[in-house]
Image (spheres, helix red, strand yellow):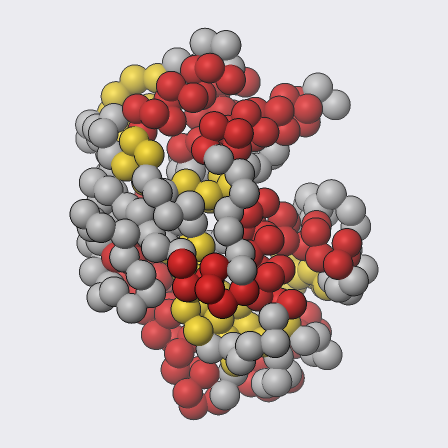
Amino acid sequence: MIGSAIASILPEHGYTVRVLVRDGGPATPLARRPDEIVRGNIMTGQGLDEAVKGVQTVLYFAGTSVPATSGDNPAIEFEASLPPLTNVLNALVRCNPQARFFFPSTGGAIYGSCDNAPSESSPTHPLSAYALGKALAEQTVQFYNDVFNIRSDILRISNAYGNARPRHVPQGVIDHFLDNAIRGVTSQVWGSLDVQRDYIFVDDVAHAVLALLKSNRRPSSVYNVGQSESHSLRQVLSLIEQVTDGRHRCELANDQYSGVARSSIDCSLLTRTVGWRPSVSLGDGIALTWQRKCALRDR
């Protein structure tokens, strides 16, 4: 979702885009066809050398896991996320060590449950296998930076949403619940309605990456990317109720993993560094997401 949003806006700003597409999978779902397409597999390393050769920047937004993937078993998370990351980093070491590398981490789970919005200098406190996997992935990226001089930026992104296409995993409550409203399926709410999250519209994430790409600053930094405020699941459901005219139905599922009780992140460093601020409120973002999904359904 995030990679597609970024790749779709880059040509408007003069960037040539090469996209790695899963071998044997469907064509890339971008709004416009990229300049180049390479087919490969990040799990096996197939096609990665060709994909990274000659580029200035590698944007690693291949989805390999979500918080529900691993549950309480860290081994599942490590197997899903660490091998493909090291495959891409090794391809950079072999073929293009001068390229800049962007890695998306998690902007909420990695800090644990916090009363105040943590900044990038706050200690990490992963409380789930997913968050632990992201923390180890960040350490892996830092290792390649220190040992092989791979210039990298780590983006700790809060809960992104805004995808027109249906999600294939029960994660990302806004997109998933709106998909269910279109299909007439009852959503399961994991845990309490009072759980709070920092939500960020996917277009705002894309523009944060664009702002970093345009900047002349030296890479190898960590940035929080979010709204810098949290909303309860109760508030999210109320907004979804409004935009769908009551078409969304939900029920509580207390036996599922609900994550930390509250997460919100301080994104002032990114504002100070490149002047980026999120521009889409939660209410407007949910309405725009609903419009996108309805437009795709009606095609």
Q: Quadrant of residue 56?
A: bottom right
Residue 268 appears at what percent x and percent y? 40, 58
Residue 28 appears at what percent x and percent y? 70, 48
Residue 221 appears at what percent x and percent y? 44, 73
As displayed, is residue 78 above or below residue 33? below
Query: Can the viewer see residue 159?
Result: no
Residue 117 located left or right of residue 104 = left
The residue under the point 61% across, 85% down is 98
Q: Nearer the viewer, residue 68 or 211?
A: 211
Q: Nearer the viewer, residue 187 or 114?
A: 114
Q: Residue furthest top?
A: 246
Picture quarter with the C terminus? top right
The residue under the point 31% across, 29% down is 233
The residue under the point 31% across, 47% down is 264
Residue 289 appears at what percent x and percent y? 56, 30
As displayed, is residue 155 above or below residue 70? below
Residue 79 located left or right of residue 22 = left
Q: Quadrant of residue 20?
A: bottom right
As displayed, is residue 243 above or below residue 97? above
Q: How many marks?
A: 0
Residue 154 located left or right of residue 206 = left
Query: Can the viewer see residue 240?
Result: yes
Q: Nearer the viewer, residue 100 or 34?
A: 100
